[in-house]
Amino acid sequence: MRNLPFRRVWRQNSYKLNSAVNCERDLEDGMKVYRVLAVSLVLSVFSPWVQTVGASSVTLGGTHVGDALISVSSQTEFSSALAPSFSFSQITPGMYLKTKVLVAGGDLPTGPNGSWAAVSVKQDVKTIGLDGTVTSVGSGTFTLSGTREGTAVIVVNGSTKYASDIDGSFSFADIHAGMYLKTKVVVGEGDEPTGPSGSWIAFSVTEAVPG
């Protein structure tokens, strides 16, 4: 038996390589010959914006490789941080997705026609912090002054989370003028607001002390 440049591990009547190699090897064990193709495959995470949607693929912009064509299959897993279920048919342009894709050595795509084969696709949101002082409160909205975006109209909905660094309980009904709030708001591509008329949709609202 010839010496092999990697350690063999016997487990359940099969050989397992303790490191990946980019070539085909013969593993010999007495009269048995096992042919193994060991390709260096790893996962890479893309977290960009959907540009277009095809029959079984999506094009994502803003990834670390630029625009990326992501191919899905029956093996791709779908999930959502916003809803209990999610599927490929729900993907639309402008959506923020976190995808895990299978890449070969050298960060090369492994899907058909140069696409990136998706192992998982997760609907997610991108948020930024807008902190400031409440100047007014409306029906499901409030206005903050002194944020990184200047004066900002914040819109809340049924998914908005509330917390307090001062008191144990806090809700929208407790918000009043003069209060200092830290908010995380959902943004679109380019960190643009996603609410109506340039408002910002609140992912979370926290009562806080300035500074």
Image: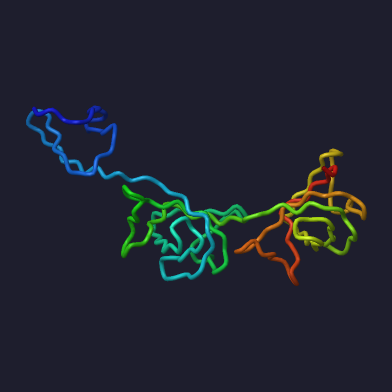
Towards the viewer: 203 or 85: 203
Residue 118 point in image, percent of width and height: 41, 55
Towards the viewer: 91 or 41: 41
Residue at image location 19% in from the left, 41% down from the top: 36
**Would residue 190 appear left or right of 179 to someone viewing this image?**
left
**Would residue 155 appear left or right of 11 to someone viewing this image?**
right
- Res. 78 in view: no
Residue 79 point in image, percent of width and height: 53, 53
Residue at image location 22% in from the left, 33% down from the top: 14
Residue at image location 23% in from the left, 27% down from the top: 7
Tell me: residue 107, above or below residue 113: above
**Would residue 74 appear left or right of 19 to someone viewing this image?**
right
Q: Quadrant of residue 3?
A: top left
Residue at image location 82% in from the left, 53% down from the top: 132
- Res. 183 in view: yes
Residue placed farthest to the right in the image? 177
Towards the viewer: 140 or 83: 140
Tell me: residue 165, above or below residue 146: above
Residue 184 point in image, percent of width and height: 72, 52
The colour scheme used to paint the residues is rainbow
**Would residue 188 appear left or right of 211 to someone viewing this image?**
left
Indicate the quadrant containing the C terminus: top left, top right, bottom left or bottom right: top right
Total tally of numbered discs in the picture: 0
Residue 185 point in image, percent of width and height: 71, 56
Indicate the quadrant containing the N terminus: top left, top right, bottom left or bottom right: top left
